Image: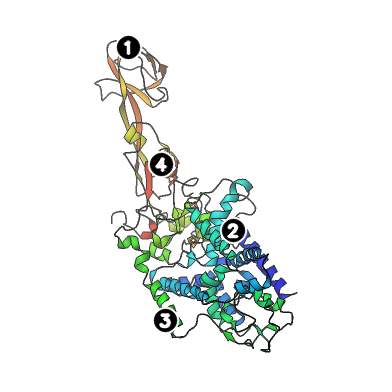
Amino acid sequence: MRIVVARRVSQGFFLLLFFWFCLVATVGAGFLQLRGWPINWLLSLDPLTALGTMLATHTLYAPLLWGLGVLALTLFVGRFFCGFVCPLGTLNQMTGWLARLTLGPKDRAEDNHPGRAQAVKYALLAFFLGCAALGGLQTGLLDPLPLAFRSVNLALLPLADPGVGVVHDAPRHYEGVWWIGLVFLAILALNAVLPRFFCRFICPLGALFGLAARVAPWRIGKATDKSCGDCRLCESHCEGGCRPSGTLVVSECLLCCNCLDRCPSGRIGFAGRASAAGETALPDFSRRGAVALLAAGAAGAFSAPLWRVEDAAGLGRSPLLIRPPGSLDEERFLARCIRCGQCMRACPSNIIQPSVTTAGLIGLWTPVLNYRLGRSGCQPNCIACGQVCPTAAIRPLGLQEKLGQGDYAAAGPIRLGTAFVDRTRCLPWAMGRPCIVCQEVCPVSPKAIFVREVFEPVRGGRLSLAGARGATLALARPLAVSGNAASGDYYVRLLGAPEATPVRLVGGGGTELALAAALPGAAPGREVEVLIHLMQPQVDPARCVGCGMCEHECPVSGLRAIRVTSENESRSGPGRMLA
Ligand code: SF4
Ligand code: SF4
């Protein structure tokens, strides 16, 4: 099989695998949904994730060893990952190819001429590694694998969800996803400017592979330096912009192998020796190049205050910053999260959202819980997000640990935060309207929401009696309440008898009221007051786990009358509520 055909087969296979893993990273009853598919395998092949998390945490999460294996292989055969595996590279290659269908070989060769600007990606790599060493892990912003997963998971697949119906049974929404989609589209569109634009100029993972490829003994190159026909057909199809017809820029070769295939005289080969026509590499490690790289790394390391601009401004951490269950404490979380969006895709409640402002600049597109969006709160029997996180930024919890049962009974359940009732917006507290939704939906047993029962006089509910017969009262004027008087929430009591037990209204209208029992002391000329029975919710912080069911279901739209904030969250340790 020709090497180019093998490369295309490999690219097609890994691209389909990538889309398959995105598609099946959902929780549901369908045969394709989260049935033990190794959906993080492609992400764990990424050595930049391994290196970044190692620098940021001084530990290596075992599944990321795959990435170090890929880097080790690159040290021998060059950037095979870019040419044969990377799904974003394949998409770039396809769009670049489409954009150049009408170009002749000369124009194509011009597009593929190597340029010093290709060294920019090495500066970006140095910057991100500097960040990881001191500031926080930001590689996921431009690392092609998390970027591709995030874009497809959050921007593309939700477009298909409602129509296709097999992906999810209900449409999904992600906050601020336009920006994620636009970045992805821009990356693809840039291939119209130059082929594989992102790979050549921006990709920090490609830069890491480029550094490794410098020392790879096996590489593309000319077998002889004798002049060839100078047809430059090899260059007109070179994806990396690495000049195979002359002095090869060895670090830029993506192993697309087009030059091998195109050379009419078979002068180019893949062998364990340097190209006979000469070699060079980017970045140039002369004094200027090295200084530029060091400066980029130092800029990354010392950019920590910029990423934490909210802290510098004294704003502190937003109380709305609620992370998925099992998340590490904030420092360690930011040192691990690569913003791949796997947890957001997997969450059946659609409450894990990419942070736009909640987690600050340093946490852009990291997962935060938003109980206003989505389909419910965090479901008690779900632990999907921790199971799919490729870096253990969200620990893979078991159900017992999440619920605080069995071996974890002493530690108690995982708390995401605490619900607070806003008495200025809560219907029973602020409006004198009955509502008990939050208590009903609270999944904790015994419930974390308990109620204070009160009987409050209703507006216009003071009435004179025209008569009283058993459990029926005749009124001097009709009763006018804004709700349904027979709903069971309304009661009647003699005016001036606050100690008397109110009697429930069960029916009637106009000038006649039906009660559940006779009202003691009722007689013509006496006055009664109509009361509404209210159950005013209160939260027991010792029981609340911050699952957000109450906030999600609260009928006060907009700013809910009960809201969860991060106080008392397990990941910050005990006592945060009072601190
Ligand atoms: S555990 Fe909660 S937050 Fe995590 S995926 Fe399940 S419902 Fe979503
Ligand atoms: S927390 Fe979510 S976005 Fe971050 S690495 Fe884990 S799965 Fe990806």
Task: Name the spot of residue 219 as percent of width and height, x first.
Answer: 63, 82
| Residue that badge 3 annotates | 291
First in sequence, mark 4 or 2: give its number: 2
User: 347 or 134, which lies in front?
Assistant: 134
Q: Are circles 4 and 3 on residues that touch, CB within 8 Å?
A: no
| Residue that badge 1 annotates | 476
| Residue that badge 2 annotates | 22
First in sequence, mark 2 or 1: give its number: 2
Q: CA distance from mark 4 to mark 2?
A: 32 Å
Task: Name the spot of residue 157 as percent of width and height, x first.
Answer: 58, 53
Label number found at residue 427: none
Q: Residues within 10 Å of mark 4 (few under 14, many from 20)?
A: few
Q: CA distance from mark 2 to mark 3?
A: 41 Å
- Amino acid on which disc 2 is placed: Cys
- Amino acid on which disc 4 is placed: Gly
User: 391 or 216, which lies in front?
Assistant: 216
Task: Name the spot of residue 569 as percent of width and height, x first.
Answer: 37, 55
First in sequence, mark 2 or 3: give its number: 2
Task: State the SS at label 1.
Answer: loop
Residue mark closest to the camera, 2 vs 3: 3
Task: Name the spot of residue 161 as percent of width and height, x first.
Answer: 59, 49
| Residue that badge 4 annotates | 558
